[in-house]
Image: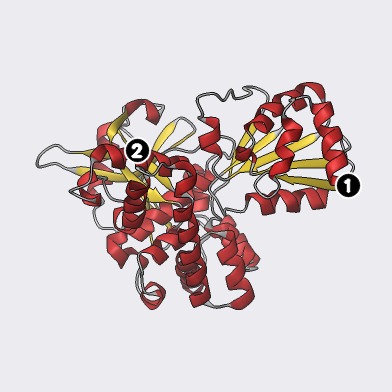
Amino acid sequence: MPLLLRGARQTGKSYIVEDFGTHYFDNLVTINFELNPEFKFSFRSLNPTQILQELHALTRQPIVPGKTLLFLDEIQECPQAIQSLRYFKEQIPALHVISAGSLLEFALDGDKFKMPVGRVEFLYLYPMNFIEFLYALKEDALVDMIRHASFNQQFSLAVHERCLELLRLYIIIGGMPGVVKSYIQENDLQRCQSLQINLLATFRNDFGKYANLAQQPYCQLLFNKMPDLASRHFKYVDVDPTADNRGLKTALNLLIKAGLITLVKQTSASGLPLNANINEKRFKLLFLDVGLIKAAGKLDIDILLNNNLMDIRTGAISEQFIGQSLLTIQPGYDQADLFYWQRDKKGSEAEVDYLITYKENIIPIEVKSGSTGRLRSLQLFMEEKEIPLGVCMSTNELRKEKNIAFIPLYMLSEITRLITE
C-alpha cells in the first residue's frame, strides 16, 4: 500500500525518504507540492494512469512500477493527492508511493476530506532518540554494549559515566536531525543553540498556516510557556491567569495536531487498555524535543554539562527525555500514547510518572534523582494494582532489587528486553 509518513516539521521526513529512494530504487521522483504548487493540477482527476503521464511529462523522469519510488512531499498542500493514494493502491499496486507532510493532521481532519481507509499505511516519525544519536556520533561500540547489558552482565563505572556524559550532550543538542548534523560537522554547541532558536521561530511562523488571527495569540502564549509547563500537571491558569480558557484549549489542540505538544494522560490503570481509563481533564504536557525545550528555556549549557541531570528544574528535563524516548520505542505504525497515574486521596497522595503496557502487563515507571530511596508511590501503585514488576529510571547503574528494575536513563531503549529478563 502507499505509505503516509507523519510527523512534525523538521524531524527528517523528506531526508529519510529521499535517502531510502536513492539507495534502493533505480530512480526517485520527488514531487514537492509546497515548492512546486503547479503539480497540484495533475491530481485533479484522481486517475493514477493520467497522473503518472502528466508527472512524467513535467519532470521528464521515468516512473516505472517496481523500479521507481514516487515521493509526494508536503502532501497536505494537495488533498486530492492524498485521496489519489487509494487509486494507486487499487489500479497500480506495483508502484511504490511514499507521501509525507508536516502539517498533515490539519488536512486529514478537514470537514470535506475523506481518508482512503484501508488503502494507505501510516508511519509516525519523531526526533532522533538517544540510541540513534549515538549512532550518528559513530559510538557504535557503546550502543552494542548498551544493547547487550543485562542484570548479570553490567559494564564498568567508566562506561557508565561515559554514557551519562553523552546523555547530557544529547539533552543539550536534542534529536532534531538538522541540529545533530550541525554538531557532527562543526562541534559547536553555541551554533546548535542558534539552530534550535531558529527552529522555534519556524514553528511560530507556522501558526498562521493553521490558526486564525484570533487563535494565534493563544498559540504564541502557550508555545512560549512550554519550558515552564513541560512534565507538569497542566492548568490553564499556569499559562496566563487572565487568558480565556476556551482560547487556550483551542490553541492546545492546534499545537497537538502540529506535533509540537504531546499529552501524557492520567489513567486510573484499572485495566487494559490504559486509554479506556483516562481522566480527560487531567494531563501533563511534553514538548516535541528535549533540546528545543532547553533552548526555549534559556538553560545554561555549562549547567547541563556539569550537573546531575535529575537536579535540573526538579527533574522536568529528565521526565521530558523519558516521555520523548517512550514515544520512539512504541510501534511506528500506530500513533503512540503516554500515560501516568495519580492518586489524590488526602493524606495518601501518590504519583507514578509513566505507565506502559508490555505483553498484557502494566509496567509502572518512576523517574528518581540520586539515591532511589523508598519509591513510595511506585510501591503503593504496585500493591494497590497487584503489579508484579516496577521500573525506576535514574542516573544510577543498572541493577535489580526484589521486584523493581533500576535502569539508567540512557538504557531506556532496552526497557522491554530488561523487563523480560
Q: Could you tell me residue 228's position as x and y percent?
A: 29, 57
Q: Secondary structure at mark 2?
A: helix
The residue singled out by tag 1 in the image is: 26
Q: Could you tell me residue 181's position as x and y percent?
A: 62, 67
**Is 114 positioned to the left or the right of 305 in the image?**
right
Q: Quadrant of the N terminus?
A: top right
Q: Could you tell me residue 17's position as x and y percent?
A: 71, 48
In front: label 1 or label 2: 2
Q: Which residue shows up at 68% across the image and 35% down it?
A: 3
Q: Which residue shows up at 87% across the image and 40% down it?
A: 57
**Is 346 positioned to the left or the right of 73 in the image?**
left
The residue singled out by tag 2 in the image is: 250
Residue type beneath disc 1: Asp
**Closer to us: 173 or 71:** 71
Up/down of 387 relative to 392, above or below:
above
**Is 415 positioned to the left or the right of 374 in the image?**
right
